[in-house]
Image: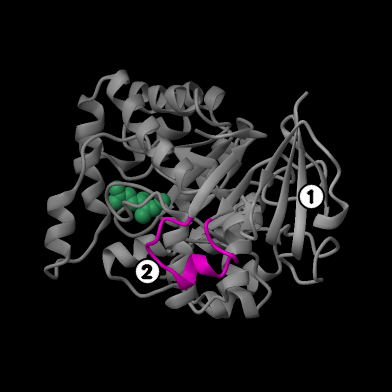
Amino acid sequence: MTTTVITNIGSLVTNDPALGDGTPIGLLQDAAVVIDGDRIAWVGPNADAPAADEAVDAAGRAVIPGFVDSHSHLLFAGDRTQEFNARMSGRAYTAGGIRTTVAATRAASDEALEANLTHYLREALRQGTTTFETKSGYGLTVEDEARALRIAARHTDEITYLGAHIVPPDYADDPAAYVALVTGEMLDACAPYARWVDVFCEKGAFDGDQARAILTAGKAKGLHPRVHANQLSYGPGVQLAVELDAASADHCTHLTDADVDALASSETVATLLPGAEFSTRAEWPDARRLLDAGVTVALSTDCNPGSSFTSSVPFCIALAVRDMKMTPDEAIWSATAGGARALRRTDIGRITPGARADLVLLDAPSHVHLAYRPGVPLVSDVWRQGKRCP
Ligand code: NIG
Ligand code: FE
């Protein structure tokens, strides 16, 4: 197996407090990293770096773990430019816009859906994302949900069944029948491809009882829950996520004190998606309140054509720092180690011996520049599973 040593790393984010300066991001100055095959083999001071088959000189620049984007919706066709344009002229965002994408997605061929997916995956990889989760939710028939997940399964292991995104127009008069489909035939068709089950628990989508039935049915089929919770209004989503030991409660924009307390005393990660608040001109989730209460926070893109059409984790980090008052250290941790926690993974999101060799070399001396230089393409090189990406 080929070994590679990256030398002269000015600043290395390891996310291992024991390896670095004792802070959660485990920062090491003047460091080197050795990759062996698809794994990190060694991390330490540059002066002690062992020889390897290949050497890369970081020339004083920063290296960080690859981003773990634990929440995206990339199985879709079409776009919603007009809806965004209208919103920027004052119209409100509602769950109803999802129907436009459902119609376009149903009409698309398998080839078109997969080409769209790979387009956004390449875009994300170029911006440093080395692990991504993605969901169904724009098919909303047994066949269309299953084919979305079948296509996704060719590109990632982190796949979420979101048949319960909205009640589709064809079931508008009988939502109970749609819940029966989502928990029955559609679940049977989708479960073989998925690791996770999700529900949009929101006014205009699914209420608490429906969401509980959907997540419980998914659990019985071996899928683990995650929940679109408390995005557009207060509601039962976060409490339900905690009750069912969901890996994450996503959005968390409208939280009561009881919601925050429930998250703080659970293993459920709060996944914040500032691209959605940016693109819908909504109020920011209160990241400080969550962090100060001891909640584990992940940062992700929510990339989708309706509420957050960005594949850029660096953009989300900049928003989180500027507008959600996270420190640069908290934001980088949440976009890497936090994302890994939200996917209940221990092999990614850190640069430590034995971890998967997912690394990003920045054209900057420090990870702080991701927020300090917003909108600038700072990703120089990406290694995914030990392979340098073209
Ligand atoms: O996470 N909230 C539900 N789903 C997406 C938006 C979907 C859409 O508008 O197409 C979200 O924001
Ligand atoms: Fe989402």
- Residue type marked 2: Ser
Task: State the residue position of label 2.
Answer: 233
Q: What element carries label 2?
A: loop
- Please provide percent x and percent y for residue 156: 54, 31
Task: State the residue position of label 1.
Answer: 352
Magenta part of the chain:
363-378
> What residue lies at 47% left-to-right and 33% top-to-bottom?
183
Q: In this view, does 83 lie to the left or right of 235?
A: left
- Please provide percent x and percent y for residue 82: 12, 52
- Residue type marked 1: Thr
- Which label sits in the foreground, 2 or 1? 1
* Residue 367 in magenta stretch: yes
Indicate the quadrant where residue 285 lies. Answer: bottom left
The yes-or-no answer for disc 2 within 8 Å of ligand 1 is no
- Please provide percent x and percent y for residue 112: 28, 24
Give the mark nearer the N terminus: 2 vs 1.
2
